[in-house]
Amino acid sequence: MRRRERERFDELFEEVLAELPEGIHRLLEECPLVLEDRPSLAIRKELGITDDEDDILCGLHTGVPLTERSVERPDVSDVVHIFREGVVDMAGGWEEGEDEEGPFGGEERIRKEIRITILHELGHHFGLDEDDLDKLGYA
């Protein structure tokens, strides 16, 4: 991702973050957000994602969900990773357009995808699975 796109994304990210309820901000104190352009090679290997695959990874929760913690693993640190390139790709890119499936792309769609990704990954922190998140509209 080019520097200008990264700066543009980060501005949108900060705006979306500021609009989230105070309760979400308290959650982020215990499960911080890390912005990256794309998943690292180590993360891709761990998840079995190869460079030639079309898998779009917008975010990732690392750590142990609260529902699976025990006194034997009290010091697990959780992190929510947000991947700029995946979010922009999932939203349809920076430019607005329309095809047979309808409108795509643009800053508003990117903002929406940032919000969904943050809430989706925080949901994993609390033990929600993909079906749960889909029912909530965060898939």
Image (cartoon, rainbow, N blue to C red):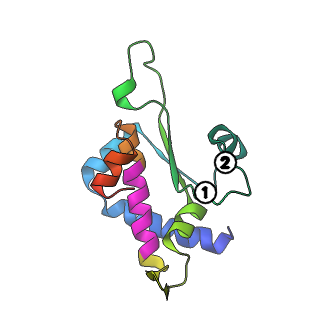
* Relative depth, front residue between 24 and 63: 63
Q: Mark number for residue 55?
A: 1
Q: Earlier in the sequence, mark 2 or mark 1?
A: 2
Q: Is residue 123 above or below residue 111?
A: above
In the displayed structure, would residue 4 be above or below residue 99? above
Question: At 45% across and 17% down in the image, what residue appears?
Answer: 73
Can you give x and y, in whole percent of width and height, for residue 13 in the image?
46, 64
Percent position (x, y) of residue 33? 48, 48
Q: What stretch is highlighted in magenta?
A: 109-120
Say which quadrant the N terminus sits in: bottom right
- Residue plotted at (42% across, 70% down): 111
| Kind of residue sitting beneath label 2 | Ile
Q: What element carries label 2?
A: loop
**Residue 55 picture quarter:** bottom right
Image coordinates for residue 100, horizontal then vertical, percent: 47, 85
Q: Which of 114 and 6 is in front in this view?
A: 114
Label 1's element? loop
Cα separation between marks 2 and 1: 7 Å
Horizontal and vertical percent position of residue 92? 53, 75
Residue 91 shows in this picture: yes
Which residue is more in the foreground, 118 or 13? 118
Identify residue for label 2: 49
* Residue sitting at x 42%, y 39%: 31
**Dot 2: within a 10 Å radius of its alpha carbon, few (fewer than 14), some, or many (20 or more) residues?**
some
